[in-house]
Image: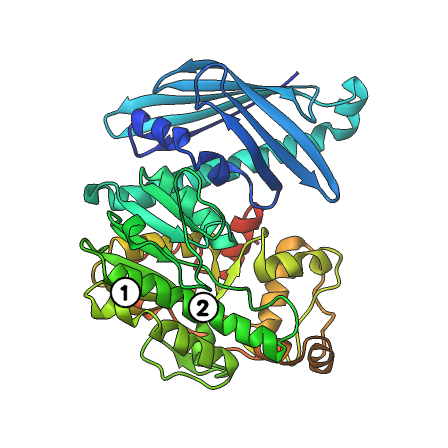
């Protein structure tokens, strides 16, 4: 049996560290983003007998895993054993050891056997050891980063927060993160509402204002994706409606409440600036031209009822969000991993990006920073050209990145959507975030890619 141990000092109490692991979003936050892991069912919390069922997908194959808790000491430890899964045996002990009132030691110990007995250990042993090490390095780094962000605003106390678009790439990560900070998160959903949910129908303008009473903050992320297929006239109309109608319905309902939320953070996009080449742009820049610029202007204007009612409104103009779980990076990874990646078009267009963890952190920062209002650029401080993006991604993956995708091919395959999203660009700077004291985990592209992909920093030359 192979034994693995990792320990990290954490600048919070053992009780606080334990509470973070006991929060509903802990599984989501600790699941490596480069793995396709989905929780199927959970029974209980951390106590003995509690059980979590999840699936680990490897290509078309889904590997079921059932983890049952077989030891527990409130505030100090819990352990789970694999009842079903890919290993011949697996037991994981989580320990939270006090080192003082405001410091503790996080310890993870795993004992496991490779499948297929001695042959499996011989063939797959080194690969499994590297996989386990990579996973727990990520888990400890994320635990430390999440808790540090929560501690910065701990004095404000827990909040009751409504989130739309909670099942999307950003919403899913945000909900789990907020739950780890002890906040009560309620999802705004289109389907029939279950526990912890409020139903609405933005297309029909249906939203019960009574269901919105008592929230301290609202984060509005819902909207139809813009990169899913060619932009036909019908598709463009749907994109516009999905953003403006939903925002208008929600903002009007919030404006009429007896007890209004303190803040509404409403998603927007750097498409507001249009294709601006290498011109540096902060939140004071004028809007650009084109379909995306027109949509984002109307999108932001739809939040006027909330703003006019005295609610602090933040329009989060998001750049290219980097995560292997979705968006541009997820689509780029397969060809780049095969050595088939490279610049798009001329390669000179500027890509203003942000790591998913930093975008989640920016939303959290905006919730608790009264000085932030109006447009806020959700981008990292170091935009790059398409050529530079391909070079860095290839370097991080250890693959060449020299095969270009010509602009003509982009226009032929994707039409206006490809022209706007792949061949256009803007050098957008996070002026408001930086001025308000926000700290980026991943200020450089290489840091962001290594963080999101769980790859170690390059050794010094």
Q: Earlier in the sequence, mark 1 or mark 2?
A: 2
Taking the image as shown, residue 457 lies to the left or right of residue 316, namely right
Q: Is residue 139 above or below residue 322?
A: above
Secondary structure found at label 1: strand
Secondary structure found at label 2: helix
Q: Point out which mark residue 420 bears.
A: none
- The residue under label 1 is 313
Q: For residue 56, what is the image quadrant?
A: top right
Give coordinates of residue 43: x percent, y percent: 50, 24
Q: Is residue 431 above or below residue 73?
A: below
Q: Is residue 69 above or below residue 382?
A: above
Instruction: Please state which of residues 328 and 347 is positioned toward the viewer in this rendering.
Output: 328
At a point 40% along the width and 72% down the height, the residue shown is 299
Q: CA distance from mark 1 to mark 2?
A: 16 Å
Taking the image as shown, residue 208 lies to the left or right of residue 199, namely left
Q: For residue 348, what is the image quadrant?
A: bottom right
At a point 27% along the width and 41% down the height, the residue shown is 151
At a point 40% along the width and 77% down the height, the residue shown is 298
- The residue under label 2 is 243
Taking the image as shown, residue 7 lies to the left or right of residue 12, namely right
């Amino acid at each position: 049996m192979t034994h693995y141990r990792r320990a990290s000092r954490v600048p919070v109490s053992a009780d606080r560290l334990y509470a973070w692991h006991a929060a509903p979003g802990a599984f989501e936050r600790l699941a490596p983003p480069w793995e396709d892991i989905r929780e199927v069912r959970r029974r209980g919390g951390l106590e003995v007998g509690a059980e979590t069922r999840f699936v680990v997908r490897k290509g078309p194959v889904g590997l079921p895993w059932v983890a049952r808790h077989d030891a527990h000491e409130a505030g100090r430890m819990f352990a789970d054993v694999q009842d079903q899964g890919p290993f011949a045996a697996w037991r994981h002990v989580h320990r939270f050891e006090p080192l003082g009132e405001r410091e503790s030691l996080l310890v993870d110990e795993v004992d496991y056997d490779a499948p297929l007995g001695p042959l499996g250990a011989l063939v797959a042993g080194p690969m499994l050891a590297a996989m386990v090490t990579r996973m727990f390095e990520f888990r400890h780094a994320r635990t430390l980063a999440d808790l540090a962000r929560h501690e910065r605003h701990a004095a404000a106390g827990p909040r009751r927060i409504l989130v739309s678009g909670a099942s999307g790439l950003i919403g899913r990560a945000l909900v789990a993160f907020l739950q780890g900070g002890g906040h009560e998160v309620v999802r705004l959903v289109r389907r029939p509402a279950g526990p912890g949910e409020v139903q609405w129908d933005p297309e029909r303008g249906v939203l019960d204002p009574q269901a919105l009473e008592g929230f301290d903050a609202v984060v509005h992320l819902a909207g139809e994706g813009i990169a899913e297929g060619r932009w036909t006239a019908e598709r463009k109309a749907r994109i516009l409606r999905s953003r403006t109608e939903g925002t208008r319905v929600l903002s009007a309902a919030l404006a009429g409440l007896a007890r209004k939320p303190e803040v509404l953070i409403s998603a927007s996009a750097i498409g507001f600036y249009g294709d601006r080449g290498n011109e540096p742009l902060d939140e004071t820049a004028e809007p650009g031209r084109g379909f995306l610029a027109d949509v984002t202007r109307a999108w932001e204007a739809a939040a006027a009822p909330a703003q006019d009612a005295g609610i602090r409104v933040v329009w989060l103009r998001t750049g290219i969000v980097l995560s292997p779980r979705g968006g541009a990076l997820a689509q780029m990874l397969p060809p780049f991993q095969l050595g088939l990646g490279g610049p798009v078009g001329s390669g000179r267009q500027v890509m203003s990006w942000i790591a998913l963890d930093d975008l989640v952190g920016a939303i959290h920062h905006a919730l608790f920073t009264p000085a932030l209002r109006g447009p806020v650029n959700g981008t990292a401080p170091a935009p790059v050209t398409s050529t530079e993006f391909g070079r860095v991604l290839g370097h991080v993956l250890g693959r060449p990145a020299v095969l270009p995708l010509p602009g003509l091919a982009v226009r032929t395959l994707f039409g206006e959507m490809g022209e706007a999203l792949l061949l256009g660009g803007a050098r957008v700077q996070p002026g408001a975030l930086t001025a308000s004291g926000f700290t980026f985990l991943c200020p450089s592209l290489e840091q962001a890619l290594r963080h999101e992909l769980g790859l170690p920093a390059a050794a010094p030359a």
